[in-house]
């Protein structure tokens, strides 16, 4: 049975989409069929990490929500585009369902909204029709109806936060909501931590605050920034400390 993994943050700018893409890539590298859905419809962006641009996105999640196509018609196989044409093991693949980056489509969402219930139907259809092992949901930051649905149906919820007081407060709200929704597996990932920090002390502090396991602490890395979201970092640099930290996250996802 496929696992649904939501990757979320209370605020934007945490590196949520980058982490989502890298987690998906490492799962596919292990031979899994992985779906990635960009539900950050108001400010989509994960498609860039998978080498897609507006002209190629002839259908999107928006089109599915507006009953213009089936969910699988908006899913693009993107494995060959990343990691310098990474060849995954037999069975391994990533299917991306992007959200539209056209200004008119984003404006329509903001003005008219959409039937959030269709998302759940679409997730289930995508898993069944593409025979997925994992579905990664790159959520909208904050808490809204879409986010609550994604959290509620997740087998695993990963909350991304920076070592920042604003993130700490927002994460507390998100953790509380996740527990009320009985999410079975909840992990935190601390991103963009200064290398001068005592990572073990930071881990203990955050785990004590939220009574929740920290899956990884990702350092603020010039190497990651230098790639400028032009590819999947973990495939390009398999021995980098950032990659090893993402591998820890993937190991937890696979273990639950």
Image (cartoon, rainbow, N blue to C red):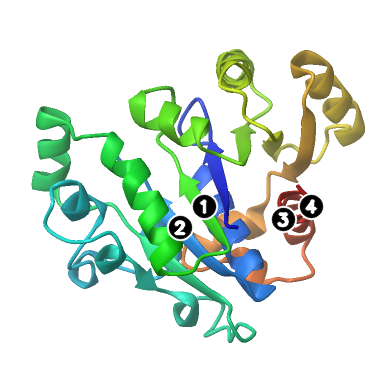
Of the image marks 4 and 3, the number of the one nearer the N terminus: 3
Foreground: disc 2 or disc 4: 4
Question: CB under 8 Å between callouts 3 and 1?
Answer: no
Q: How many marks overall?
A: 4
Of the image marks 3 and 1, the number of the one nearer the N terminus: 1
Point 71% across, 50% down: residue: 253
Image mark for residue 250: 3
Q: Which residue is mark 4?
A: 255
Point 43% across, 68% down: residue: 95
Q: Residues within 10 Å of mark 4 (few under 14, many from 20)?
A: few
Element marked by disc 4:
helix
Residue 146 relative to residue 231: left or right = left
Q: Which residue is mark 1?
A: 136
Q: Which residue is mark 2?
A: 36
Instruction: Kindly report the distance in space between the C-alpha atoms of the residues bearing marks 1 and 4.
Output: 16 Å
Foreground: disc 1 or disc 4: 4
Nearer the observer, 194 or 146: 146
66 above or below 94?
above
């Amino acid at each position: 049975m496929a696992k649904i993994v939501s990757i979320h943050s209370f605020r934007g700018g945490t590196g949520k989409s980058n982490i989502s893409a890298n987690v998906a890539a490492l799962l596919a590298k292990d031979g899994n069929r992985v779906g990635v859905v960009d539900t950050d419809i108001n400010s989509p962006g994960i498609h860039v990490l998978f080498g897609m641009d507006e002209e190629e996105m002839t259908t999107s999640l928006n089109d599915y929500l507006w009953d213009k196509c089936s969910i699988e018609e908006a899913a693009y196989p993107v494995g060959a585009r990343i990691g310098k044409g990474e060849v995954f093991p037999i069975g391994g693949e990533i299917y991306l369902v992007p959200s539209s980056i056209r200004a008119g489509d984003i404006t329509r969402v903001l003005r008219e909204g959409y039937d959030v219930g269709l998302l759940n139907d679409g997730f289930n259809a995508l898993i069944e029709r593409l025979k997925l092992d994992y579905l990664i949901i790159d959520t909208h930051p904050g808490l809204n109806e879409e986010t609550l649905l994604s959290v509620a149906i997740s087998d695993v919820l990963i909350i991304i936060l920076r070592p920042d007081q604003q993130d700490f407060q927002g994460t507390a709200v998100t953790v509380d909501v996740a527990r009320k929704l009985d999410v079975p597996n909840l992990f935190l990932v601390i991103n963009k931590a200064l290398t001068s920090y005592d990572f073990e002390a930071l881990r203990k502090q955050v785990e004590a605050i939220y009574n929740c396991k920290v899956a990884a602490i990702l350092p603020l890395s010039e190497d990651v920034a230098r790639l400028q979201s032009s590819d999947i970092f973990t495939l390009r640099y398999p021995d980098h400390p950032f990659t090893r930290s993402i591998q820890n996250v993937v190991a937890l996802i696979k273990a639950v």
